[in-house]
Image (cartoon, rainbow, N blue to C red):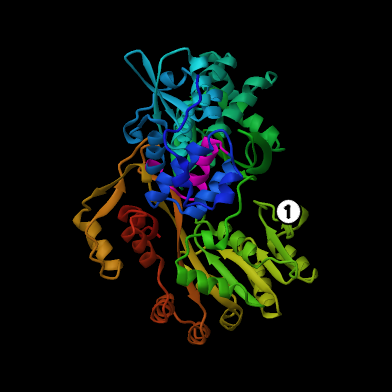
């Protein structure tokens, strides 16, 4: 097949880009990449500087170029797909209308689909409709050679295609085959369930089953996996964007074999089935190294296993990437560079406190500081930081670890979580003796976190003297960009919005309709919503006087604190999330 030759003279398009940088990347499809990029520049989806960088880094690889302008420089998915279609003279797919069919997808192997960023979505008049993020002649020829069928090419952005691939080639697709490999007849399953005994001589099916469960969880962006025995089945659920979703179910007869395998991998006692146990294992999924924390607990139907997935390859988020409003970012950044004192991150489980603490460490870490942490567990390893993992069996708790750290000449101390009065007292004394202390605390908001210290029996004057600030936070689901649509909220929703948005007269509201990209939920990914309580002299006097949370909150708001609820409504106003999501996440607490 002849190579694609651009009909246009690329000189005019290149004029807007530094010439020497373009010439540094003369790859096979540099001209086509240039044309795609220039269309995005003309549509104000990409700056000329970012186009130059993308061209240089992609080196003429059209797929890599698409990944860079989409993932790094934030070009719109639909705009990118339209630009690809225009340059390669094909049609841009309406991805919102795509109905995925695993049988159609399996016309090409998962390996070929991932390598070439393509996926078949339909058959029309004997031709296979193929989505592609790089329909260059080279990739077209490769797929056509393997498929040996007429193909109608349509463009889509690479992120959407990879999501479609994850949903079409599910890692759990052949679980029925793996279950059958156990060769458990109904009567044998009943016996196994009653006896609680399972032979795991044949490891291969068990190993594959565990791999499939974790693999699909990774592809679905799950943070936790729940393996739950019920009366008549074994339910597998994933926590995605903070919400539990049932992934699939297994015959109850598989339960003992599966839990035994997970316990072996986690170095747990497989004989002990009554007491709760904790463990951890590592594995490689789709080329990514992941740590999996495992916890077991006995229920009336048998042991339940919960796994927390920690992606070791995930890049650390900087403080400026957390989604702080600009004013909050400036105040918080200044606060965490204080030479001593304590800053608390407050919120319920799953509110993103660890991410905020790690981003803060990145902000303040330097060669001139001794930064030491005590955590349970150490979720991500920081270069240049001394991280200590608690071990209660060895007597290493947050309190004892903190005492040991104070003998290590620290400048900055991170205490993963303040759970008891001993840890709280030592942390506060550390802040009062010239150290900067970061920690997290369970609390509904920033003001309530201060009263948690009082509830622990810490003297009010110590709290007022040591704490310099509290950041309260939650995570809200984002509206899916792929299926965002306007809608008319009900009277109750409008009343809530107007009451807490500062009198906004917003006329149009948006929500997600539900699509393949977001698995029909209307939401994809999450964003933090924050409130920053700065401890002023006036607040210190109220704390020492044992003021109520309402009195503290009233003064903080009068001094300029924007509450989480107000910030959440600002996200609604900017079409980032929805009123029902705010109500469910913030009003419930």
Side of 568 where 47 appears, left or right: right
Residue at the far left in the pictured view: 491
Q: Position of residue 537 (x, y in %)?
A: 52, 87
Q: Position of residue 223 (x, y in %)?
A: 53, 44
- 442 vs 31, nearest the viewer: 31
The answer, for residue 230, to whether it is visible in the render is no
At 57% from the left and 19% from the top, the residue drawn is 178
The answer, for residue 203, to whether it is visible in the render is yes
Image quarter where the C terminus lies is bottom left
Asked if the stretch drawn in magenta spans residue 442, the answer is no
Among the 4 quarters of the image, the one containing residue 353: bottom right
- 404 vs 20, nearest the viewer: 20
Among the 4 quarters of the image, the one containing residue 405: bottom right
- Chain part drawn in magenta: 60-78
Which residue is the site of mark 1?
391
- 557 vs 125, nearest the viewer: 125
Dominant secondary-structure state across the stretch colored magenta: helix
At 48% from the left and 87% from the top, the residue drawn is 538
- 412 vs 298, nearest the viewer: 412
Q: Residues within 10 Å of mark 1 (few under 14, many from 20)?
A: some
Side of 180 where 425 appears, left or right: right
Q: Position of residue 286 (x, y in %)?
A: 60, 33
Label total for image: 1
Q: Position of residue 74 (x, y in %)?
A: 46, 50
At 64% from the left and 62% from the top, the residue drawn is 362
Asked if the stretch drawn in magenta spans residue 62, the answer is yes
Among the 4 quarters of the image, the one containing residue 375: bottom right
Q: Secondary structure at mark 1?
A: loop
At 58% from the left and 77% from the top, the residue drawn is 467
Side of 18 where 570 appears, left or right: left
Side of 189 where 507 appears, left or right: left
């Amino acid at each position: 097949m002849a190579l694609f030759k651009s009909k246009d003279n690329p000189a005019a398009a290149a004029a807007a880009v530094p010439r020497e940088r373009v010439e540094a990347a003369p790859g096979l499809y540099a001209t086509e990449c240039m044309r795609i990029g220039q269309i995005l520049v003309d549509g104000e989806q990409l700056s000329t500087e970012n186009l130059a960088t993308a061209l240089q880094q992609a080196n003429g690889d059209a797929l890599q170029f698409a990944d860079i302008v989409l993932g790094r420089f934030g070009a719109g998915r639909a705009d990118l797909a339209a630009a690809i279609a225009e340059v390669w003279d094909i049609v841009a797919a309406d991805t919102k209308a795509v109905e995925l069919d695993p049988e159609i997808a399996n016309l090409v192997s998962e390996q070929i689909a991932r390598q070439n960023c393509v996926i078949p979505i339909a058959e029309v008049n004997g031709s296979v409709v193929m989505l592609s993020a790089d329909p260059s002649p080279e990739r077209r020829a490769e797929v056509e050679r393997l498929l040996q069928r007429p193909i109608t090419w349509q463009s889509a952005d690479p992120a959407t295609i990879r999501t479609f691939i994850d949903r079409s080639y599910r890692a759990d697709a052949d679980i029925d085959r793996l279950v059958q490999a156990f060769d458990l007849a109904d009567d044998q399953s009943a016996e196994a369930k009653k006896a609680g005994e399972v032979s795991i001589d044949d490891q291969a099916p068990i190993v594959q089953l565990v791999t499939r469960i974790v693999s699909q969880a990774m592809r679905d962006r799950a943070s936790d996996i729940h393996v739950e025995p019920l009366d008549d089945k074994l339910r597998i659920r994933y926590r995605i964007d903070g919400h539990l979703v049932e992934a699939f179910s297994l015959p109850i007869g598989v339960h003992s074999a599966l839990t035994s395998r997970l316990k072996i991998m986690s170095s747990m006692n497989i004989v002990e089935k009554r007491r709760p146990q904790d463990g951890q294992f590592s594995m490689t999924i789709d080329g990514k190294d992941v740590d999996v924390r495992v916890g077991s607990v006995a229920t009336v139907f048998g042991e339940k296993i919960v796994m927390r997935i920690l992606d070791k390859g995930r890049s650390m988020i900087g403080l400026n990437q957390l989604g702080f409003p600009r004013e909050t970012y400036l105040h918080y950044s200044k606060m965490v560079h204080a030479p001593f004192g304590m800053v608390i991150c407050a919120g319920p489980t799953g509110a993103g406190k660890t991410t905020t603490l790690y981003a803060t460490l990145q902000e303040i870490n330097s060669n001139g500081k001794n930064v030491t942490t005590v955590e349970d567990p150490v979720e991500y390893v920081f270069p240049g930081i001394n991280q200590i993992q608690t071990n209660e069996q060895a007597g290493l708790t947050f309190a004892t670890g903190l005492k040991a750290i104070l003998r290590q000449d620290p400048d900055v101390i991170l205490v993963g979580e303040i759970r008891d009065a001993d840890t709280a007292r030592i942390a506060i004394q550390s802040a009062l003796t010239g150290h900067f202390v970061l920690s997290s605390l369970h609390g509904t908001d920033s003001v309530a976190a201060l009263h948690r210290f009082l509830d622990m029996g810490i003297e009010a004057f110590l709290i007022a003297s040591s704490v310099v600030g509290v950041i309260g936070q939650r995570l809200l689901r984002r509206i899916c960009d792929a299926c965002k649509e306007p809608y008319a909220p009900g009277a109750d929703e409008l009343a809530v919005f107007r009451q807490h948005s500062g009198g906004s007269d917003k006329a149009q509201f948006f929500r997600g309709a539900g699509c393949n990209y977001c698995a029909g939920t209307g939401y994809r990914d999450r964003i933090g919503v924050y409130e920053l309580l700065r401890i002023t002299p006036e607040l210190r006097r109220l704390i020492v006087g044992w003021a109520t949370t309402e009195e503290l909150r009233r003064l903080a708001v009068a001094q300029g604190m924007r509450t989480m609820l107000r910030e959440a409504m600002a996200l609604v106003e900017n079409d980032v999330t929805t009123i029902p999501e705010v109500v469910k996440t913030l009003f419930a607490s």
